[in-house]
Amino acid sequence: MLGIRTESDGYEEEELEDAEVSEIFKQMTADERNLLSRFVNLLKDHEEDDPKFERVREILEEQGWIDRGCIIFSQYYDSISWLAEKLKDIYPNEMIGIYAGGPRSGVFQNGIYRRIPREDLKARVRKGEVRLLLGTDAASEGLNLQALGSLINLDLPWNPTRLEQRKGRIQRIGQIYDDVWIYNMRYGGSVEDRVHDLLSQRFSSIYKMFGQIPDTLEDVWVKVAMNKIDDAKRTIEAVPPQNPFEIRYNMIKPINWESRAVVLDDVERRRYLLKGW
């Protein structure tokens, strides 16, 4: 927002919005820029004691997630790059991979980072050489990581489908473990924390109904961010209590076909079958 980073070389489409967001804020007033600068300084002052980092370390070390193999997702390249820098000091002998858009994928080995092609990185994961992988949402589609048995979401994307895409990287045919472990992180009192509280009671039933979280629930994040809690609740409650397909096709009614006055010929039958729902 302050224009500290303006280059977008090497970013893939899903990362461009983050990289180019500074263009929107070129007309900020001096007071607005000063306030943002204060925020940046506050973040830098607390960078070393970030609670999410401490929790990641605890999960990996004390709960043994690194032994199962773990991928850590964030929406932002800066976040995973920063986290990788911290983790390489804790695990100097561990090969730590970064999977991101453009030419920025690579590995930390013996504390030294070097870029490698994404295909090479995927091959290292399959062989078990990389047990700890950090990725942006560039890694959330078209990537098979059955060798990893756990996933940490460093942040929760506003589009709920992204969460399903992330989980789908390790929950695949051929996965090594019978179950996968997933940990969703959020800061207490934040917008994502309030959204999670609102949705927590409905997530299970909605997922069973649709097989994933509907994209329409992205509206909930926006409404909670604007403190329109009642509107957010109405959006959640608007999701039908039963799968729409089941509501319409939950029973087969007996029909006496011999009494039907109209019989479709082959051409008509094909035409009707080709129609959409």
Image (cartoon, helix red, strand yellow):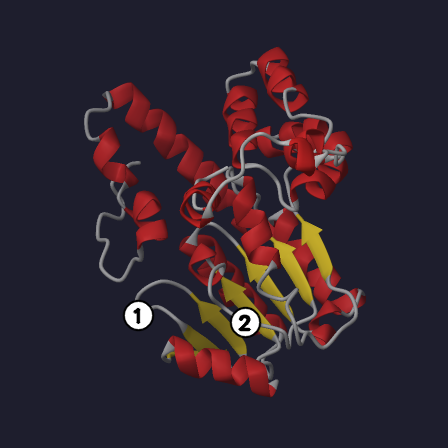
* Location of residue 176 with respect to 185 vertically, above or below: below
* Location of residue 275 with respect to 59 vertically, above or below: above
Query: Which residue is identified by label 1?
Result: 103
Q: Is residue 71 left or right of residue 111?
A: right
Crowding around mark 1 (Cα neighbors within 10 Å: few <14, some 14 to 19, many 20+) is some
Q: Nearer the viewer, residue 115 or 245?
A: 245
Please tell me which residue is depicted at 54% across the width and 45% down the height of the picture.
Answer: 161
* Location of residue 19 with respect to 133 vertically, above or below: above
Q: Secondary structure at mark 2?
A: loop
Q: What is the total number of numbered labels drawn onto the structure image?
A: 2
Percent across and percent down for residue 191 are 58, 29
* Res. 232 image quadrant: top right
Q: Secondary structure at mark 1?
A: loop
Please tell me which residue is depicted at 52% across the width and 42% down the height of the picture.
Answer: 157
Residue type at numbered disc 1: Pro
Of the two numbered discs 2 and 1 on the same chain, state the one appearing first in sequence: 1
Query: Which residue is identified by label 2?
Result: 144
Crowding around mark 2 (Cα neighbors within 10 Å: few <14, some 14 to 19, many 20+) is many
Q: In the image, which is nearer the foreground, mark 2 or mark 1?
A: 2
